Image (cartoon, helix red, strand yellow):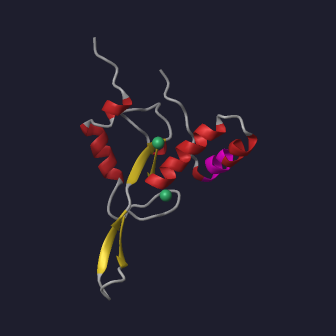
């Protein structure tokens, strides 16, 4: 019997890596805060020298329903900071404290971060 693939293993597959690569380019940016993955900025020490800045971008699953054949709307490209924020807000909203639920629903509305637990 074939073992059901775990998310952890799924993220190691060629399929996922290629899908990820198709989303992430040097000029792609976070869907939430707009930070660009690679951007030149001036560094202070030597006048006129430019260094690339690299911010990691994560491909977040808004929905796990179509694992392996994700639709465009199932995924959102976000920087590590916004990704962590999104998941932290999800967790906080489940604590039942109204203010967290309020912040999360605001976040959801503005990002379409429609989080659904993976269905078994
Ligand atoms: Zn961001
Ligand atoms: Zn995520």
Main SS, magenta residues: helix
Res 115 → quadrant: top right
Find out whether residue 105 is within the magenta segment. yes
Q: Residue at image x 32%, y 63%? A: 26
Please indicate, yes or no, whether residue 27 appears anywhere in the rendered image: yes
Decide if residue 98 is on the left or right side of residue 75: right
Part of the protein shown in magenta: 104-110
Q: How many marks?
A: 0
Please indicate, yes or no, whether residue 79 appears anywhere in the rendered image: no
Viewport quadrant of the N terminus: top left
Q: Is the residue 107 above or below the residue 12 in the image? A: below
Q: Residue at image x 59%, y 40%? A: 90
Q: Point out residue 95 in the picture as x, y percentages from the top left corner.
A: 66, 34
Res 27 → quadrant: bottom left
The outermost residue toward the right is: 98
Question: Foreground residue, 87 or 31?
Answer: 87
The outermost residue toward the front is: 45
Decide if residue 82 is on the left or right side of residue 17: right
Q: Residue at image x 53%, y 30%? A: 117
Q: Residue at image x 63%, y 50%? A: 107
């Amino acid at each position: 019997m074939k073992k059901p693939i775990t998310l952890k293993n799924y993220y190691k597959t060629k399929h996922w890596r290629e899908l990820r690569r198709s989303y992430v380019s040097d000029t792609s940016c976070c869907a939430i805060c707009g930070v660009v993955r690679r951007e030149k900025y001036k560094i202070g020490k030597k006048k006129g020298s430019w260094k690339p800045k690299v911010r990691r971008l994560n491909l977040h699953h808004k929905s796990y329903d179509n694992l392996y054949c994700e639709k465009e709307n199932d995924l959102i490209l976000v920087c590590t900071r916004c990704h962590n924020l999104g998941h932290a807000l999800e967790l906080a909203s489940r604590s039942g404290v109204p203010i967290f639920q309020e912040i999360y629903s605001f976040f959801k509305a503005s990002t379409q971060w429609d989080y659904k637990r993976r269905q078994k």
